[in-house]
Amino acid sequence: MQQRTALLLRALDSVPAKMKGAVEAEIHIADSVHFRFLRRYINETGWPDLAHGSLYAAYIAARDVEHVADYVPKAYLAFQNGQLGMAAVNRLYQNRYFLSNVLTVMPLLQGHGLKFDVSSFLEGDVPSNLQQVLSAVHQHCPIKDIVCVLECNWSQSARQAYGLMYEFKNGADNWLRFVSGVGDACPSWNNRSLVHAIMTYRMPYDRKASRLIAYVLFD
C-alpha cells in the first residue's frame, strides 16, 4: 500500500502539468482504499506489530488527517510495546492539530470549484496562470469564496510553514496585487467585509516541496 502511494507521489513531482490532475485522482483513489482498510483493520485487531506492518500503518495513518487523532493513543501504546518508533508517533501527534483545518477546508472544497497551482507565490513570483485564476473569478462571480491551501512537506515544522505563509502574504507585493485583482474581478467578494483577505490553510503533504493551491469556489 505504502509503495503504491509513494510511487504516485514521486510521479506527481515529475509529470507534466497537464498530467498532474490524473495522477492526483489516482492518489485520491489509493488513499481512500488504504484509509478504509487501516480503520477496519485496527478496529478489528488493534495496531499491528512490526512483523505485520506497524511502520506502514503509521505512514497511512499520518496521511489520513481526518482520523489521525483517533490513531494517536493506539500508536503510542505500540511505541510503549516496542512496535513503533518515537518519530512515527510524533508525526501522528503533531498532525492531529490539522484536524481543525480539515473540518474547515474539506466542506468548502466540496461541490463546484476550480483548482489552480499558484506555488510561484512561495518564491515571490507571479504565477504564469494568474490571469486564468482571475478570469475564473470574474466568470463565476458572485463566487462563494476563494481560498488557498499550503501543502507542506512532512519535514517542515509548523513554525517554518507559518513563517513561509507570513513572508509571502505580508511581504510580497505580488500577493497583495493578487488579492486586489480578485476584488476587481468580483466586486461582490470585495464588498463582503472590511478586511479583504484570502484565507490560507496549512495541510500536511508528503511531497518533496511545498505547494500552494488556490480554489475558486462557486455555487
Image: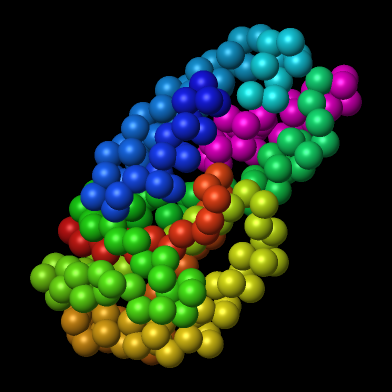
Main SS of the magenta part reads helix
Is residue 208 visible to us here?
Answer: yes
Is residue 110 visible to us here?
Answer: no
Q: Position of residue 88 (x, y in %)?
A: 74, 36
Identify the magenta region: 58-82
Q: Quadrant of the C terminus?
A: bottom left
**In this picture, is 100 found above or below 36?**
below
Horizontal side of 36 relative to 26 (left or right) equals right
Q: Position of residue 189 (x, y in %)?
A: 26, 79
**In this picture, is 173 found above or below 88?**
below
Q: What colour scheme has been applied to the protein in the rendered image?
A: rainbow
Q: Residue at x 75, y 14 (%)?
A: 49
Residue nearest the observer in this picture, 199 or 133: 133
**In this picture, is 37 found above or below 32?**
above
Horizontal side of 216 relative to 62 (left or right) equals left
Q: Residue furthest left?
A: 139
